[in-house]
Image (cartoon, rainbow, N blue to C red):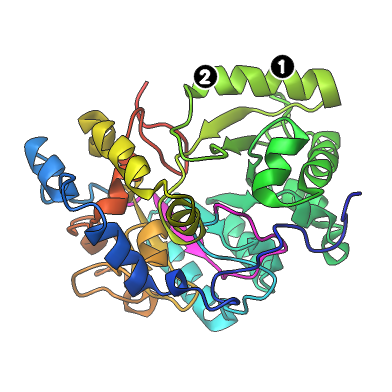
Amino acid sequence: MSKTGSQTGNKTGSLISIRHPLASTAEQLRVLEGRAPRLQRFSGALAASALYPLRSTSIQVLQVNVGKLCNQTCGHCHVDAGPDRRESMTRETAELCLEALEHSAIPTLDITGGAPELNPNFRWMVERARALDRQVIDRCNLTVLLVASQSDLPEFLALHQVEIIASLPYYQADRTDAQRGEGVFEDSIAALKKLNALGYGDPTSGLQLNLVYNPVGAFLPPAQHAVEADFRRELGRRHGVVFNSLYTITNMPISRFLEYLDRSGNHEMYMEKLVNAYNPAAAAGVMCRTMVSVGWDGTLYDCDFNQMLDLPVGGALRHIRDFSPTLGAAALAQREITIGQHCYGCTAGAGSSCGGTLTA
């Protein structure tokens, strides 16, 4: 039975709610950096590719994680988000993010969470960014569109031409619900139909609806174009759902997916798989080279993954309040990026980023 309008997800809750040792970022780093010492260090792989130290090249995306509150508790979540989390960006910090956008030429605001729409400042941020004529991306879990307090959210997103990047692990209920919780697939399809009714997914409407696939298990995603073709055929045939593009993303060995790897005895095998699939071309194009990530408290990071491991950016700019027209995007665009063994997750195979694969 669907849980439409309520909380959905796995029964285990967030790691922090059950006081799991891997709720600690220090423990996660100890496992990531020390559990498989025979594997090549990521810094060594970069050096062999003439990419060490890894540096940013420009800032094209300001990605803002507005908090860890979510209506789902997914088994692979690198944020350890859930209904029990209360970390949430304040209006004051949200204003600093929009001031940074205004005082720079960064073209895209990418809002993520948790379920970013549950932050009380989400709609204000969208309206401010669109008034600045910036592209706005909402990383949506789909089921939040069925939460009673968000009943008008699809129309709001369409009105402001917000690009939706929506996670959907698979086009069948059993595999989606296995990762995201009972009833999530049914609610996700209902949400997709709402978006389609507004024009999302129609290539002539200008309303972008892109899906995200990530593996339900300890393996790398198949070829993106093949997964996209399967999803387009099956979602259309079974449910009449359309979308623009599909992105494949590799599960990162962080937080709840790291706990799964550890609990199932797959950690060393998965890390070896990532290391052996290291792709220098993907490493050259990793998303951290063209973006900066802002935490819910305003701290700056190279990406959302470093954010969840408490690995902030180096250099003088450490908080969004330090951003200025003279020492803002230009300074961040020259920074050295903080790396670790988890970075193999973005550089394996065809590569992985918030926009899908990094190589053809």
Q: What residue would you read off at disc 1?
A: 233
Q: Is residue 72 magenta?
A: yes
Q: Quadrant of residue 152?
A: bottom right
**Residue 184 pos. (x, y %):** 77, 48
Q: Earlier in the sequence, mark 1 or mark 2?
A: 2
Badge 1, how many Cα within 10 Å: few under 14, some, many 20+? some
Instruction: Confirm whether residue 330 shows in the render.
Output: no
Residue type, mark 2 in image = His
- Local secondary structure at mark 1: helix
Q: At x 70% / y 60%, what residue is drawn?
A: 72
Find the distance from the CA under tag 1 to the CA under tag 2: 12 Å
Q: Is residue 243 left or right of residue 339?
A: right
Q: At x 78% / y 21%, what residue is drawn?
A: 236
**Residue 148 pos. (x, y %):** 88, 63
Q: Nearer the viewer, residue 184 or 10?
A: 10
**Residue 169 pos. (x, y %):** 63, 38
Q: Is residue 104 magenta?
A: no
- Local secondary structure at mark 2: helix
Q: What is the total number of numbered labels drawn onto the structure image?
A: 2
Instruction: Confirm whether residue 37 shows in the render.
Output: yes
Q: Nearer the viewer, residue 87 or 326?
A: 87
Q: Nearer the viewer, residue 217 or 59?
A: 217
Is the residue 144 above or below the residue 283 in the image?
below
Is the residue 1 above or below the residue 317 in the image?
above
Q: Quadrant of residue 349?
A: top left
Q: At x 63% / y 60%, what residue is drawn?
A: 126
**Residue 266 pos. (x, y %):** 41, 46
Q: What residue would you read off at disc 2?
A: 225
Q: At x 33% / y 52%, what residue is drawn?
A: 59
What is the magenta range?
A: 59-76
Q: Is residue 137 left or right of residue 235?
A: left
Residue type, mark 1 in image = Arg
